[in-house]
Image (cartoon, helix red, strand yellow):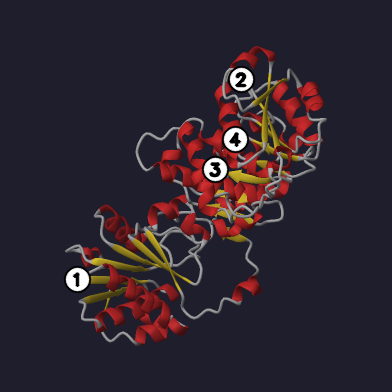
Amino acid sequence: MEAAGRAVAEVVLERHLPRPVVVLCGPGNNGGDGFVTARHLHAAGWPVRVALFGDCGALRGDAAKAARGWEGPIEVPSLDLLEGHPLVVDALFGAGLGRPIEGIAGELIDRLNRDGLHVIAVDVPSGLHGDSGKVMGRASIAECTVTFFRAKPGHYSIEGLRRCGMLKVAEIGIDASVLQTISPQLWLNAPGLWRENFRHWDRAVHKYARGHLTVLGGALATGAARLAALAARRTGAGLVTIATPNSAMAVYQAAEPGNLVAEIEDGASFAHLLADERRNAILVGPGSGLFERTRGAVTAALATGRAVVLDADAITVFAANPASLFGMIRGPVLMTPHEGEFRRLFPDLSDVPGKVERVRRAARRSGATILLKGPDTVVAAPDGRAVINVHAPATLATAGSGDVLAGIAGGLIAQGLSPLAAGAAAAWLHGDCAFRFERPGLIAEDLIGLIPDALAAVSPGESGGQKDR
């Protein structure tokens, strides 16, 4: 607690010049952290006021000891504390809050949010649940949140992203060996998780060794399959075939010359195409349409037992009977739904608190790795391992962006990555491409040309000797 409170005080001192500060202390250990913070700020010469929610005599353990270490007055909470727009240290409620915030605590949070006060939050902004990211009635909006040892899932939820401001993780003396004891199965996405899964290609490699992705193309929304195919090729797949109905053959043939094109009218002909085992990865969904042809293609793809990516229409076409889809999954499968598509397959999971838990349950039920898209994308495998990706700007909210993501994932899976590694890497690379655009007006087509740059920044390098001179 001493280390935690000192870490919060150091953040305040780093970010602000001396000014009036109000420390709002709750009745638990978060309040104890607040008392320590107040003591260090007062020692640094800051004018500090402390308010405690509850009776000082009811504090227990380290929190009681921290309160005794504060030699100044302890005030009763009131809105008057916020007069003059002081800096606020929010040490009210921690990550495990189990009830909505009401009463004067709620009024204070509403006021500091309404007035846009500078807030430094201790562990989490009060009212944000640390595991689920749910707002417990209301939650403060901080400019900076100081948490300890490791971040919490709630910090990277959509509400956490809106409310935490800059997140600082402070070390407070907890030994890293604790992680071996608790064996965490949740990670924040970063290249270190999956870059070593990228292949080191030898000079003698041929295109089939780099994987052959087969994409089901639709008759109407032909741009979706083309975006996915181009993204897969830019990501490194050696070949990509678009399987199209005869009515759209001319569209696909007249488009990008590097895309192979095959005529496929139904599930049976798709199965015949997939009889070639060199077609080691399959993508169904982008622009394929809500037709029996799509359902048949999914059935044929899953029957191969090879790696399959299911996106968009390949998910929605099974909305009336999700169990029939899950029952066919026997190989490595990655599904990439947005929230609406997710609800169609897993309507009963809507009320499960926390996106991570929802996606984990969906993966466990379906037998597929699930990538649930959003600003807080979660990728979860059936065994419970999960990754949160927040490396993504708002500019990705543009038509065709999801098709590019599916294509990146398909290209990685074709090169041998597992669904979890491919999903995590695709989410990161997809966001990184958008960050690299660096100006307004991003459209999906722009992402594809930036994939090589994003890959070069994270790839461990290719083997095969020195470059020719």
Q: Nearer the viewer, mark 2 or mark 3?
A: 2
Q: CA distance from mark 4 to mark 2?
A: 27 Å
Q: Is residue 463 above or below residue 251?
A: below
Q: Which residue is mark 3?
A: 373
| Residue at 45% across, 82% down | 60
N-terminal of the pair, mark 3 or mark 1, is 1
Tell me the kind of residue under disc 3.
Lys
Left or right of residue 445: residue 420: right
x then y, percent, for residue 371: 60, 45
Q: Name the amino acid, label 2.
A: Tyr
Q: Residue at x 30, y 63 (%)?
A: 119
In primary-sequence order, the first of circles 2 and 3 is 2
Quick one: label 4 or label 1, which is nearer the N terminus?
Answer: 1
Q: Residues within 10 Å of mark 2 (few under 14, many from 20)?
A: many
Which residue in the rendered view is the most extreme toward the front? 469
Q: How far apart, in angstroms, are the residues tagged by discs 2 and 3?
A: 28 Å
Q: Are marks 3 and 1 in contact (CB under 8 Å)?
A: no
In the rendered image of this protein, does residue 5 appear above or below residue 203? below
The image quadrant that residue 186 belongs to is: bottom right
Q: Secondary structure at mark 4?
A: helix
Q: Name which residue type carries label 4.
A: Glu
Kindly identify the residue that appears in the image at 64 percent across and 61 percent down. Answer: 185
Q: Kindly identify which numbered label has been placed on residue 252.
A: 2
Q: 42 or 439: which is nearer to us?
A: 439
Kindly identify which residue carries mark 4: 341
Compared across the picture, whether 440 is left or right of 465 comes to left
- Residue denoted by label 1: 19
Would residue 59 be seen by someone viewing this image from the given angle? no
